[in-house]
Image (tube, rainbow, N blue to C red):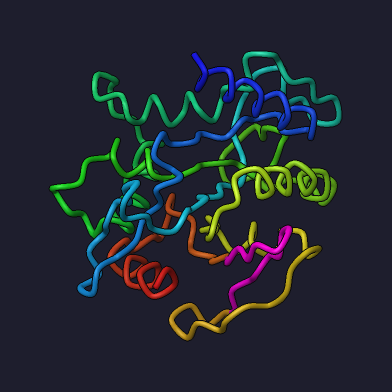
């Protein structure tokens, strides 16, 4: 009950900061993840903690009346949208659908398709949050400049509350549209021919890595090497 009360308090605080789609927060997020010397994924424990990782998607898609352009009105049940997506993906009783491959490919990029680490264990060591706080009507659509601008305040609220060590951003477009306040250019990584980004939030440094969006043109074994290098 205490844990649920804390969760409800955090949810209320995030909603007051204009977070409309509440993040999926794994039960073991605070324990983090790391990689051993051979690049194998290590799930953190209370005794052996890794780095806390926020996985940042761009947007939800919805063809309902809640996402009418210019007249966006979020239904109350939409607050759990992100959590429901991850929980449905992790529910083995659910029929496998095409959209689930996006999460599977990213999961493999972390674990290098290690058969000894199951999906639930991986995602329960992560946070997943979608940046845009207005749903779009179809895949591969981009939000407007105002959508990205409006999403900055809730994004900072997520960073402030959960204090991740690293953020892995799905897509160069999203990375280019992240807010630049409280940050500075980070390390240049030759493997992606790009600099990373560092946020400084209340004295805490948060490293940000852009990767290709896992939905298309995504080679999980290549990105595994990049992520290992980044997190080390």
Q: Residue at x 78, y 33 (%)?
A: 18
Work out whether residue 70 or residue 80 is closer to the camera in this orientation and state it: 80
Nearest the eye: 220 or 159: 159
**Measuring 77% from the left and 25% from the top, which residue is drawn there?**
68
Name the residue rendered at 43%, 31% in the picture: 86
Q: Is residue 177 visible?
A: no
201 sits to left or right of 207: right
- Residue 46 location (% of width, % of height): 35, 46
95 lies above or below 48 = above
Residue 177 among those drawn in magenta: no
Q: Quadrant of the C terminus?
A: bottom left
Instruction: Tell me residue 134's x, y (percent).
Output: 72, 34
Residue 168 at x, y percent in the picture: 51, 58
Residue at the image point whose x is 48% and y is 53% from the top: 53
SS majority, magenta: strand
Bounds of the magenta segment: 195-207
Of residues 59 and 126, the one drawn nearer to the viewer in this rendering = 126
């Amino acid at each position: 009950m205490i844990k649920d009360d804390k969760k409800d308090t955090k949810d209320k605080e995030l909603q007051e900061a204009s977070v409309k789609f509440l993040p999926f927060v794994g039960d073991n997020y605070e324990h983090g993840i790391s990689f051993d010397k051979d690049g194998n994924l290590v799930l953190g424990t209370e005794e052996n903690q890794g780095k806390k990782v926020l996985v940042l998607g761009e947007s939800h898609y919805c063809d309902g009346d809640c996402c009418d352009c210019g007249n966006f009105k979020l239904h109350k049940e939409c607050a759990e949208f992100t959590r429901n997506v991850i929980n449905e993906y992790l529910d083995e009783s659910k029929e496998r659908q095409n959209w689930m491959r996006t999460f599977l490919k990213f999961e493999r990029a972390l674990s290098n398709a290690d058969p000894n680490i199951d999906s639930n264990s991986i995602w329960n060591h992560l946070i997943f949050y979608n940046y845009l706080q207005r749903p779009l009507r179809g895949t591969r659509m981009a939000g407007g400049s105002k959508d990205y601008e409006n999403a900055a305040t809730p994004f900072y609220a997520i960073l402030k509350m959960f204090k991740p060590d690293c953020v892995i951003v799905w897509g160069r477009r999203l990375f280019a549209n992240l807010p630049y306040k409280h940050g500075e250019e980070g390390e240049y990584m030759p493997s992606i021919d790009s600099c990373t980004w560092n946020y400084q939030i209340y004295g805490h440094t948060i490293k940000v890595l852009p990767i290709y969006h896992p939905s298309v043109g995504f080679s999980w074994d290549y990105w595994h090497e990049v992520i290992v290098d980044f997190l080390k």
